Image (cartoon, helix red, strand yellow):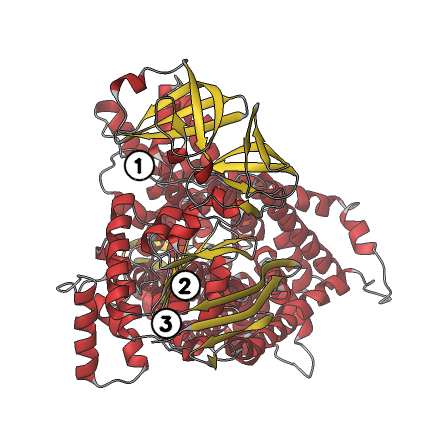
Amino acid sequence: MMRRRFRYDLWTFVLIAAWVILLILLIWPLSSILRASLLDNETGAFSFVHYFQIFTTRVYQRAIGNTLIAGFGGMAGALVLGVTLAFVTTRFHIYGRALIQTLAVVALVSPPFIGAYAWIVLFGASGVVRKGLASIGISIPPLYGMLGVILVFAFKFFPHVFLITSGALSAINRSVEEAAESLGVSPARRLFTVTFPLILPAISASALLTFVLSIADFGTPRIIGRDFNVLATEAFNLYGGEVGGNPGMASALSIVLIILSMIIVFGQRWVLRKNVYHSNLIKKPERQHVGGVKSVGLHVLAYAIVLIGALPAIIVVLFSFRRTSGPVFQPGLSLQSYEKVISTVSDPIWNTLLFSTVAVVAIVITGTLIGYLISRRPNIATGALDATLMIPYVVPGIVMGIAFITRFNDPPLALTGTGLIIIMAVFIRRLPYSARSVAAALKQVGPNLEDAAVSLGYSPGKAFMKVTVPLIVPGILAGALMSFVTAMNELSSSLVLYVGSTITMPVRIYLSVMDGEYGTASALSTILLVMTVVAVYAAFHLSGRKESALL
Amino acid sequence: MAGLKIHGLAKSYRDVRVLENIDLDIASGEFFTLLGPSGCGKTTLLRTIAGFQHQDRGEIIVNGERIDHKPAHKRDIGMVFQDYAVFPHLTVAENVAFGLKARSLPKAEIESRVAESLAMVRLDGYQNRLPAEMSGGQQQRIGLARAMAIRPTLLLMDEPLSNLDAKLRIELREDIRDIQRRLGITTIYVTHDQEEALAVSDRICVMNKGNVEQIGTPFEIYRKPQRRFAAAFVGTMNFLPGRMQGGQLTVGSHSVPFPHGVGTGSVEVAIRPENVLLTGASADGEAIALRGEVRKVTFLGREAHYTLSTEAGEIVAQVADPDRDFIEMEGRPVEVRLPLQKVVLFQSNGDVLSAGRP
């Protein structure tokens, strides 16, 4: 009876509060997008005119096609790189595995559009590598357009695939592979008939993630895509209003973008509909020692992937110390870029730290309570809450930004131009990750532990505080730091929501790149990167060096 | 110490009835076992007594006082879990002291009780270890010491041994039984392992589908099953179709007078393998005789199992200390005798018709 009464106290309140938050910060803003997409801009009447235009106008058709190309291309590239790297490092003895993992993590956490910018520095119209090659008579085309976007996505997102699948690969029962071997299946065939099917859940989960990240990415196609327009860039341009905004069309494109993501989410569920393997891990896979040419080849392969992945971050750091004159880099080293950042554009640094900190504190508190609710009080209301929390996964930041600015423009919630609106956007976008990771951590803590504490004389509330909280705190803190990292690096929603006084570092970097102030961009990126790496290192340390904490 | 009474306890999950009108009366100091297959309701019953779940109706009375309205943490009931539920972030000593701290006992008292409990489960010297450094058997000893340290009025154990390997299981069950006897604590023990139940219990309650099938001492449960389910679930039992008519029991082609049998109709004839007699063995009193053939002999060292196909159906006979020539009997015809004293008859509804005469 006590347990029941407890349930109607605290957790009912949490449930109601969670629904209120989701309604105000998620459903209500997103409904504005849906509504705007169904209204004629001129007359305000209900109409499908925007959707009709999408499917009849050449430029929008191309945007949809390009979005799919970028999504599947980025996904395929990231899968090939990530699975290869995971396989090589889990099955063969590779020297410097820790270094490889660190480089992969650097690639993972470096600000999303730094990649695009660094690739331009190297392979752009006046790129360093292109010029170098041209001087010895080799001519390669500048890295703009479709191929560039896909390449950047592949090297930007492969660490997700790598971290997810190497966990799965090292959890395969070695005996299963040995059984295939003893049945006369060649190693290559075994890989495709036994090993990969067994890690299909991990592969498909990372495929889903990289696809959604690729089609939601705004900075890369914007910086490197040139005339390769995608839905995210079109929606931003149409909303931006500089050339006669069209909010209805921007909203309709956003809805199409969300629907594309959702199709992939359901597609992944369909692929996995019966692939649930329970394996008793009797024999862990071993790392094979190979010698000679094969060993050299494997090392070159592994290091090439991670070094190219981390290259943008490395380039940005190096270039931040170069002497500049306007947009042009000059020979020689200098701290002038940093001097300029400190003297003129230090506001973004403080804004970023403030907004990220506030957002993360809110995320951690709300996410922990919701995560507990989902995993320990399963019922219809919490199940629906869990399902609703899926929505931010498929809503690109640009769309969330547009939704927020539409809904919070007028009283009673006139928040446009405040820091709060940027914080709220980051909060709702990252809340699901936190809630889900807490729910997962709680599943590791058997409910019997709390029952044991209750049988020993602690009330359910005290049992939760004394037993469950100490066990999940490291996980919560690691998750908080990762939320902090993504909050600091949030570009797309902030870009829609910022005003002069609330500008953040990613927005400032993006604007600097667009304005050709590469020195400032490099210095700011380096500062952001350093702050990110510090947070990641702390998260790594807290979670007992588990790479899974980074996802 | 405390006795436990349960009256008319019932519980359903949605429309599935997991407990149907359970009545139990457990004496103070008794070792009482709930035995049954998975899904029979035994764990639900145990968790309802602990207060982790709530009955739809019925009463739970400890020492004359109803406890079913109390929250779990005020029932003063110690619990040992199948997955140990040892707190991984606390040392062995902190685990054992955990419940004592809830009771705000003085520090010296806590220390002495922790030492005493750890000595009881033979874990002295492990105070400062973390559970992760210890084996499954040791972790369950922590769980036991932790539950006993609070000196509960009742001790509940939910399949405490089923995650351990066979040898440890026997060792720890002996320890549990010794400690329980020494402290005289009323204990309710849940298991699906019939051998474990027979070995440790004062009384066993055989459960099936939310119902109590039979309550009795291990001897009664094994030798005098009241329900076909209990007979089949505990130990090995041969069942042969038979027919009762006019005081005569017919099995296969053989009829014997069966004066204690009443009524007319088909029955099931049940007999334990160790009571089936093969050719040459001497038999006291009357017996059902069947002709058959030895299909398979399984030699197990101190005994051998003979799978026999008889005119009435297949049965297993157990022979202790088999001779060499017994081993070479596969394929040979044999005469089987089922002593009436050892035979139990069940009606088609599963109730016993006549237990063997003493």
Disc 3 on helix, strand or loop?
A: loop
Residue A98, can we see it? yes
Examine the rendering and report whether any part of residue B127 can be seen.
no
Residue A194 coordinates in the image, percent (x, y): 44, 29
Q: Position of residue A525 (x, y in %)?
A: 39, 60
Find out whether the residues at labels 1 and 2 contact each other: C-beta distance under 8 Å: no
Between A314 and B169, the one lying in front of the other is B169
Q: Residue at x 24, y 35 (%)?
A: A93
x and y percent of residue A282 in the render? 32, 38
Q: What is the chain letter for disc 1?
A: A
- Earlier in the chain: of badge 1 and badge 2, it is 1
Q: Quadrant of the N terminus of chain A?
A: bottom right
Q: Please identify the quadrant where the C terminus of chain A is shown.
A: bottom left
**Mark 3 vs mark 2: same chain?**
no
Same-subunit check for callouts 3 and 1 = no
* Label 2 chain ID: A
In the rendered image, which residue does mark 1 sit on?
Answer: A283
